[in-house]
């Protein structure tokens, strides 16, 4: 087949044909168009028009980079990779807090894909159940909130180096059984603020650090109506104040507390979802629209749900069931991807797999889900972050082999190919 001087050979799906070669070197055509919901861009024509196609259940469109990288990071002797939490250091390398053999570790990833780690022991606490959460402070050093299970205290560890080879720990509260389901963030004042559950009184509490190392903190009871505060998750809202999602065990509801001070000494609370037993495994983030987005587990339907706040205080919100498969959505974690859409890691208990759901819109009213790891029973204790390369990184627990694992996604959607389901 011979093509003309201004043509190139193109395979149209069934045969080779001659087509326009497009612009010469140094020439570019621009387009401000976009594809509609449920479509993907397949190219640009000679006039700058975006070419779109609607995905059917049998369509597969290759993304860049190929396969994800799955790595086993930590082995026993006991269970490794429980109560994981991951963030990214100022040097662009991920940092993980996790439990292994009843010991709290912080591990620095050796590269962006986290194919190897350098772990450090923070505290050997006894019977486990540490429920750690990690964040990077304004000084570039990790701060970890956790439950010291031997004495049932709430503690915060301050890493003295970016890799946490050395650290200091502070008991923040030692009254009763406290510290379950903790979550930590850095406030607009540059200080740590952590939410946690007081199991003795059935309350949601907050600790606001008084200094960068959090050697002391002011404590506030956020909600004491019934048994509330499990599965808490904290973020800093667009107004600069903390916002917390949590589970109301008395009423089996998802609730949210919006603070109107940096320390969370004043706040309002809202019931976000009361349809069935909902709100466990809640995880909160702030979208590019400045509104909170929450992922959580529907124990009645065994589904993954999301709640999108319509205003900063979340006095109005919309909820959606975004993944259904008889046992999906527990152990979830949400973050905003580099494309401005939410992305959620979660456990599929029916198939024993790690799955991810990429939101199709800002509200996350619909998602595209895929399996990331199906080797054995995997996917509990997930935590997700966006790496310095703009790609999702997920850490999770391998129940079958009792290991900590990580998957570095090859694209922003975290799927090796696009498939509508």
Image (cartoon, rainbow, N blue to C red):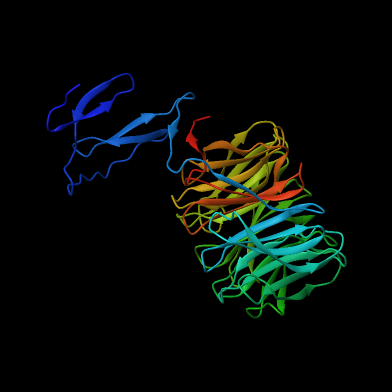
In the picture, which quadrant includes the N terminus? top left
| In the rendered image, the vertical position of residue 221 relative to residue 347, given as above or below | below
- Camera-nearest residue between 256 and 117: 117
Does residue 381 show up? no
Residue 137: percent from left, percent from top: 59, 72
Residue drawn at the location 63% of the way across and 75% of the way down: 161
Q: Nearer the viewer, residue 228 or 128?
A: 128
Q: Residue furthest left?
A: 5
Q: How many marks?
A: 0
Which residue of the protein is positioned furthest toward the front in this rendering? 1
Residue beneath the point at 68% across and 74% down: 158
Q: Position of residue 410 (x, y in %)?
A: 49, 45
Q: Residue furthest top?
A: 14
Q: Quadrant of residue 356?
A: top right
Q: Is residue 350 left or right of residue 44?
A: right
From this view, report whether residue 230 is shown above or below residue 372: below
Residue appearing at x 67%, y 67% in the figure:
194
The answer to whether any part of residue 29 appears in the image is yes
Task: Examine the image and state in which quarter residue 321 appears.
Answer: top right
Give the image location of residue 247, x and y in percent: 72, 51
Indicate the position of residue 2 as horizontal and vertical percent values.
Answer: 17, 24
């Amino acid at each position: 087949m011979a093509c003309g001087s201004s043509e190139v050979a193109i395979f149209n799906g069934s045969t080779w044909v001659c087509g326009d070669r497009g612009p010469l070197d140094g020439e570019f055509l621009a387009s401000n168009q976009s594809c509609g919901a449920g479509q993907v861009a397949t190219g640009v024509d000679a006039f700058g028009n975006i070419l779109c196609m609607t995905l059917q259940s049998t369509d597969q469109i290759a993304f860049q980079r190929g396969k994800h990288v799955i790595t086993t990071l930590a082995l026993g002797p006991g269970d490794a990779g429980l109560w994981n939490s991951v963030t990214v250091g100022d040097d662009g390398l991920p940092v993980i807090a996790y439990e292994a053999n009843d010991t709290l570790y912080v591990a620095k990833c050796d590269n962006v894909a986290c194919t190897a780690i350098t772990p450090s022991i923070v505290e050997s606490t006894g019977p486990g159940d540490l429920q750690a959460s990690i964040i990077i402070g304004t000084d570039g050093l990790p701060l970890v909130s956790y439950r010291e299970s031997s004495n049932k205290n709430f503690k915060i560890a301050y890493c003295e180096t970016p890799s946490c080879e050395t650290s200091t720990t502070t008991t923040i509260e030692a009254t009763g059984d406290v510290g379950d389901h903790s979550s930590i963030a850095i406030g607009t004042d540059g200080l740590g603020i952590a939410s946690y559950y007081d199991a003795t009184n059935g309350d949601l509490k907050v600790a606001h650090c008084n200094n960068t190392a959090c050697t002391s903190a002011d404590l506030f009871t956020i909600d004491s109506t019934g048994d509330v505060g499990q599965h808490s998750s904290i973020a800093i809202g667009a107004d600069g104040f903390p916002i917390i999602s949590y589970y109301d065990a008395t009423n089996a509801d998802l609730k949210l507390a919006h603070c109107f001070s940096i320390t969370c000494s004043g706040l309002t609370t809202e019931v976000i979802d009361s349809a069935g037993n909902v709100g466990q495994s809640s995880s909160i983030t702030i979208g590019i629209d400045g509104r909170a987005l929450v992922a959580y587990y529907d124990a009645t339907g065994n589904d993954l749900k999301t709640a999108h706040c319509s205003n900063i205080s979340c006095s109005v919100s919309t909820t959606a069931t975004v993944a259904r498969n008889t046992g999906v959505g527990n152990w979830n974690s949400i973050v905003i991807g580099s494309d401005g859409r939410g992305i959620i890691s979660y456990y599929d208990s029916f198939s024993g797999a790690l799955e991810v759901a990429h939101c199709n819109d800002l509200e996350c009213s619909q998602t595209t889900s895929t399996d990331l790891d199906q080797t054995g029973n995997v996917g509990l204790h997930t935590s997700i972050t966006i790496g310095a390369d703009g790609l999702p990184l997920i850490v999770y627990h391998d129940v079958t082999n009792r290991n900590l694992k990580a998957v570095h996604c090859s694209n922003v959607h975290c799927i090796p190919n696009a498939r509508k389901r």
